[in-house]
């Protein structure tokens, strides 16, 4: 095997010299992360037999992967011991194999095939969803295996940043690398960085120094407001109980209940794979146990059937069916009901009176991930749910459930007659006779 001389900048040498479970490199443009990772892996692959998995969140084709980068580096160093094919890269001497996959394309059974990975490289990790990471991390479990992560930060709450780098443990290396740390950074890139710094310091900090975009520029709800609401103690309130119910539309979505009394969001309850009758039974239980003032439920998709069952059971006075796409109450300010309800959350969080929100990453992520824009009339419009799901790999079910509690103005008045007229009540024993009766409460 011919010897080669490869110069790895000092900041990247821990990739080769330190033994850590996770090696997390982040920073701005032209820091050389991808080149350093590729060169380091090619070096290691020549030393001994390794199974190296190169991952992205979405890989439509092999062209979307780091396959080309590795191939180019093999050509640059004239590494004749490596064989490059259309789908993988192999070292003919040591037996090292590189494979390339998209995480979102892998079901849990396919991901299990990665158990034998020695090194897993996650490129463009800012796009990795929490769901993908939660499945992947325990899968990479071969003794002494490592996970290498390279990313340019996008948002303050990038899922992998929160899960890995925000509070790293002793077995995690976190290293920031910028163009100023890269001895091979071309002068042209340095000139572009200088020009950006002079024209727009905020863009310079994000693009060239690897700082996240501050939530609030294109986000409806900023992270600081959410964290402030989650950092306090539960506030006592005698407000009317409102329940927002976002009903699952797809197989991987959740049916989520949100319980809010005025300034206090008390809790969330989430369910999976419940049919129309099962969801209606859960709602019935909550009505009889907690006597809410209103339950606002999304009547899109399966929700229409749940609403029909509940009104047929005599709960029309309590249950309100809401369509996210319907006309807003303040139609001069909002494109649709969804934008109006979500802006209700924003105003609730940023008002003068303190509010309380459960400290759960599911609601934090949902609230801080939705982008905003304005139409030609200056009305608030939110990123479409389909676009959001494609971008994040999930639907903001928890955020939608909270938003539904802001569907209508609430005025202190008498409770619905349902709770004072015994003839309108329905026996729980009559409704709950399935295997799920009583679970989750």
Image (tube, grey):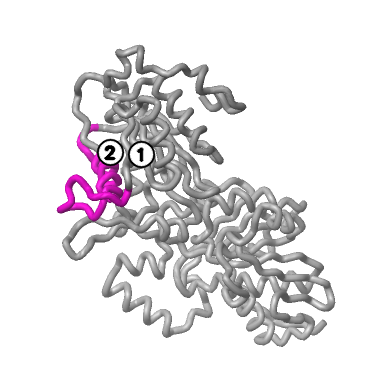
Q: Position of residue 84 (x, y in %)?
A: 73, 81
Percent from the top left, x then y, of residue 296? 33, 35
Q: Is residue 189 above or below residue 429?
A: below
In the rendered view, tell whether residue 264 sits above or below residue 179.
above
Q: Residue at x 65, y 77 (%)?
A: 70
Q: Label 2, secondary structure: give it.
A: loop
Determine whether label 1 and label 2 are within 8 Å by CB: yes
Q: Nearer the viewer, residue 152 or 306?
A: 306
What element does badge 1 sit on?
Answer: helix
Which quadrant is the N terminus positioned in?
bottom right
Q: Is residue 230 visible?
A: no
Question: What residue does disc 1 label?
Answer: 402
In this figure, which residue is indicated by the disc labeled 2? Answer: 406
Is 431 rendered above or below residue 385?
above
Q: Which residue range is magenta in the image?
A: 324-353
Q: Is residue 382 magenta?
A: no
- Where is residue 155 shown, x and y percent of the image? 41, 57
Task: Write the residue at 47% across / 28% down.
Answer: 282
């Amino acid at each position: 095997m011919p010897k080669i001389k490869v110069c790895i900048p000092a900041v990247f040498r821990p990739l080769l010299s330190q033994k850590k479970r996770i090696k997390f490199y982040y920073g701005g443009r032209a820091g050389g992360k991808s080149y350093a990772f590729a060169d380091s892996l090619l070096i290691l692959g020549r030393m001994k037999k390794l199974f190296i998995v190169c991952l992205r969140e979405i890989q439509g084709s092999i062209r979307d992967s780091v396959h080309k980068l590795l191939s180019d580096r093999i050509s640059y160093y004239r590494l004749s011991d490596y064989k490059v094919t259309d789908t993988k890269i192999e070292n003919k001497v040591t037996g090292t194999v590189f494979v390339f996959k998209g995480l979102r394309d892998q079901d849990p059974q396919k991901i299990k095939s990665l158990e034998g990975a020695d090194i897993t490289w996650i490129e463009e990790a800012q796009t990795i969803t929490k769901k993908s990471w939660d499945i992947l991390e325990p899968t990479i479990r071969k003794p002494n295996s490592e996970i290498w992560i390279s990313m340019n930060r996008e948002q303050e709450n990038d899922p992998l940043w929160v899960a890995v780098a925000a509070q790293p443990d002793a077995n995690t290396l976190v290293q920031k690398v910028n163009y100023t740390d890269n001895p091979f950074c071309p002068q042209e890139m340095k000139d572009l960085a200088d020009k950006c710094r002079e024209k727009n310091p905020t863009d310079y900090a994000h693009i060239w120094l690897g700082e996240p975009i501050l939530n609030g520029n294109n986000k409806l709800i900023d992270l600081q407001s959410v964290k402030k609401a989650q950092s306090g103690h539960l506030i006592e309130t005698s407000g009317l109980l409102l329940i927002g119910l976002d009903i699952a539309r797809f197989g991987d979505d959740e049916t989520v209940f949100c319980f809010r009394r005025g300034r206090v969001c008390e809790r969330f309850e989430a369910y999976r794979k419940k049919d129309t009758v099962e969801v209606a039974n859960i709602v019935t239980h909550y009505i009889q146990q907690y006597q809410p003032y209103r339950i606002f439920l999304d009547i899109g998709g399966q929700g229409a059937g749940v609403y029909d069952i509940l009104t047929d059971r005599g709960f029309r006075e309590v249950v309100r069916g809401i369509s996210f796409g319907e006309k807003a109450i303040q139609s001069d300010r909002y494109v649709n009901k969804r934008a109006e309800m979500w802006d209700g959350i924003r105003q609730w969080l940023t008002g003068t009176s303190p509010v309380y929100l459960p400290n759960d990453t599911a609601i934090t992520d949902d609230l801080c991930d939705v982008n905003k824009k304005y139409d030609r009339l200056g009305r608030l419009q939110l990123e479409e749910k389909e676009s959001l799901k494609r971008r994040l790999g999930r639907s903001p079910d928890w955020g939608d459930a909270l938003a539904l509690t802001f569907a209508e103005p609430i005025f202190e008045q008498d409770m619905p007659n349902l709770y004072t007229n015994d003839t309108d009540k329905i026996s729980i024993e009559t409704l709950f006779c399935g295997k799920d009766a009583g679970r989750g409460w």
